[in-house]
Image (cartoon, rainbow, N blue to C red):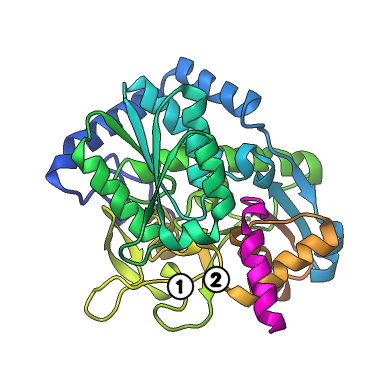
Amino acid sequence: MVAEERIDGRFGAYGGSYVPETLVAALEALAVGAQAALADDAFLATFAAELSSWAGRPTPMTRMHRLGESMGVELWLKREDLAHTGAHKINNAIGQALLAKRMGARQVIAETGAGQHGVASAAACARLGLPCRVYMGAVDVERQAPNVQRMRLFGAEVVAVSGGDATLRAAIDEALRDWVSDPQASYYLLGSAVGPHPYPWLVRELQAVIGRESREQIMQQAGRLPDLVVACVGGGSNAIGMFHPFVGDQTVELVGVEAGGKGPGLGEHGASLCAGKPGVLHGTYSYLLQDADGQVQETHSVSAGLDYPAVGPEHAMLLDSGRARYLQASDAEALAALEDLCAMEGILPALESAHAIAAVRKLAVERPGAMVLVNCSGRGDKDLGILAAQSQAAAS
């Protein structure tokens, strides 16, 4: 049995709100405001209209005949890569931007790793006329340069963070510091199902449109529910959005795929659920990568969006309850899966999504002939620079 989150934002033993006193009132106001908005038919109608007419929902579901046959499974992709701005991030961004406007915020603060949440936030704020400032690790600014340009074209201020590990963790740290300085006038548009309550719940609710559509589409197109639902996991928003509507379907196995990086050692991967232990980071209690002294460790992944040392608390609950299991895919496996999907199906996935595709080959050995539904959480245009560098390194 999977425990339900309690009213205080707990997912079983996980979740909660571990923040400075200066943020308590802002988070309480956000929790009240978010619960009221998501119970308001007028707000939900506006959100649905934006998803449909502006973000391009519902996104399609596509059978991968050639790639599935090569793996020995019936493979389907949920095409979040075809959503406006190129990833699932737009669902959460427009929902929270609408909430920020409803709550009277004068500016929006966001963080980003792979840049897709930053782009989605910048686009949503442009749509609604809200100033937007995006914090991004300096390492990610360099390796995701096209997304930085897109954010600036949408009118956002992009702040490169050179401290700490200069990736997503450092970007969240700086965004939180900014929010602490003026929590009344600012709205922090958090991009994943992490952080203090109510963010893990709020992001899950806004992203669950992925799983609801998927469940309806697979029944229409395939005539039954899939045997496995697979998604990549960094912070965990695309996966929890896909998993949540399937949690009650006990015949459907839920599989999350973390960044195996370049090896099993601390600092070589981003597999918080597979290799971490519980602790507190960025205001929530969940699994995270830490050493024997409890010091949070730097991570590595070829994909900027999975390069994070913790994971959303609902995933921690799903792991402990046994309702979902979590695997790893290495950098090399993800790159190979990306090439396979390009060559066999004419689809360029994000490197994050390629981790989920890579895991299907392992799952096919266990369950040959299974129907597998994978969330293709984003498109890979943003990763062309990384892919070119990988090809150049391999050739030298």
Magenta residues span 374-396
**Figure check: 192 above or below 167:** above
61 left or right of 291 in image:
right
Which residue is identified by label 2? Answer: 327
Q: How crowded is mark 1: few (under 14 residues within 10 Å), some or many (20 or more)?
A: some
Residue 9, percent from left and from top: 30, 44
Disc 2 residue type (three-letter): Leu
Q: In which quarter of the image is residue 299?
A: bottom left
Residue 187 visible here: yes
Q: Of residues 318 and 235, which is closer to you in this image?
A: 235
Residue 15, percent from left and from top: 30, 52
Q: How crowded is mark 2: few (under 14 residues within 10 Å), some or many (20 or more)?
A: many
Which residue is identified by label 1? Answer: 274
Q: Of residues 116 and 81, which is closer to you in this image?
A: 116
Placement of the N terminus among the 4 image quadrants: bottom left
* 386 part of magenta stretch: yes
